[in-house]
Amino acid sequence: MGWLWRASVPVLISWLLLMPPVRLDGTVDSKAPLSQWQVLMRFDKRANCEASRLQSQGPPDPFVKGDSPKAGEFGLKLRCVANDDPRLKH
């Protein structure tokens, strides 16, 4: 009788703080697929990601017009997503 060895591989989940893409006119495209969003930061805990998301203010991208009403959308449009979320796949 043979032995069956199984390798135990820990699943490492990290949390990504994502920023939506910005259109050429400086508006935020929050409806774009998550695979097109930019990773701003990585976190080991969801709570840390959410805390950073809530603290984010103003446009982090220089192409967003600072005086535009759309510029304020960034703090509200950032998302925390697990790195294994299938929506991140192309």
Image (spheres, rainbow, N blue to C red):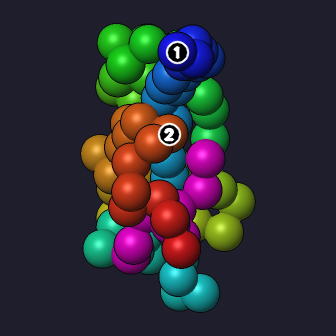
Q: Residue at x 66, y 69 (%)?
A: 63
What mark, if any, has residue 83 been given in the picture?
2
Which x, y percent locates residue 84? 45, 42
Q: Residue furthest right?
A: 62
User: Which of the two discs, 2 and 1, labels the residue nearer the N terminus?
Assistant: 1
Q: Amino acid at mark 1?
A: Met
Q: Is residue 74 above or below residue 15?
A: below
Q: Nearer the viewer, residue 8 or 60?
A: 8
Q: Residue at x 39, y 48 (%)?
A: 85
Q: Is residue 72 above or below residue 57?
A: below
Which x, y percent locates residue 65? 56, 67
Which x, y percent locates residue 81? 39, 40
Residue beneath label 1, please? 1
**Image depth: mark 2 or mark 1 in front:** 1
Magenta span: 32-39
Crowding around mark 1 (Cα neighbors within 10 Å: few <14, some 14 to 19, many 20+) is: few
Q: Amino acid at mark 2?
A: Asn
